[in-house]
Image (tube, rainbow, N blue to C red):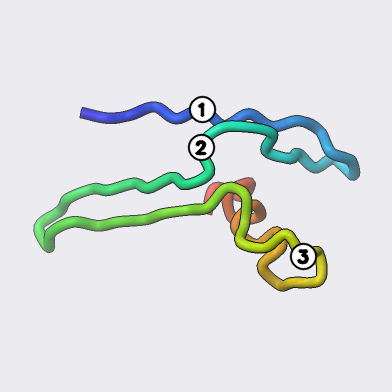
């Protein structure tokens, strides 16, 4: 069983893309011989302050498929 999430982006300058709508929290859960394995990501990052080190961190990870 699975779930499909939609995230849409648009060009924002300098060859970059900006998420304009869609899921803001994505979680992937898998199971192996050691039990559940969980990974999660905030597509919009954690801060609105451009001076914060967390202003674009999650968005950068998302764009790199990390």
Residue 60, x across and y down, in percent: 66, 55
Q: Residues within 10 Å of mark 3 (few under 14, many from 20)?
A: few
Secondary element under disc 2, as helix, strand or loop, is loop
Q: In the image, is 51 to the left or to the right of 22?
A: right
Q: Considering only vertical position in the picture, is 52 above or below 45?
A: below
Q: Considering only vertical position in the picture, is 45 above or below 54?
A: above
Secondary element under disc 1, as helix, strand or loop, is loop
**Residue at the left extreme, as displayed:** 33
Secondary element under disc 3, as helix, strand or loop, is loop
Whether residues under marks 3 and 1 lie with C-beta atoms below 8 angstroms apart, the answer is no
Instruction: Out of 37 and 53, give the one closest to the viewer.
Output: 53
Query: In the rendered structure, which disc, 1 or 2, sits on the residue that comes first in sequence?
Result: 1
Question: Looking at the image, which residue is at 37% across and 47% down?
Answer: 27
Residue 25, x across and y down, in percent: 47, 47
Query: In the rendered structure, which disc, 3 or 1, sits on the residue that comes first in sequence?
Result: 1
Q: Which residue is mark 1?
A: 6
Residue 42, x across and y down, in percent: 53, 52
How far apart marks 3 and 2 lie (CA) works out to 21 Å
Q: Residues within 10 Å of mark 1 (few under 14, many from 20)?
A: few
Res 26 → quadrant: top left
- Observer-side mark, 3 or 1, equals 3
Q: Which residue is mark 3?
A: 49
Question: Looking at the image, which residue is at 44% across and 30% down?
Answer: 5
Mark identifier at residue 23: 2
């Amino acid at each position: 069983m699975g779930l499909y999430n939609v995230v849409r982006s648009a060009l924002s300058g300098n060859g970059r893309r900006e998420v304009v709508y869609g899921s803001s929290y994505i979680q992937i859960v898998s199971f192996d011989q050691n039990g559940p394995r969980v990974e999660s990501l905030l597509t919009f990052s954690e801060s609105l302050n451009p001076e914060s080190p967390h202003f674009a961190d999650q968005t950068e990870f998302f764009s790199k498929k990390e």
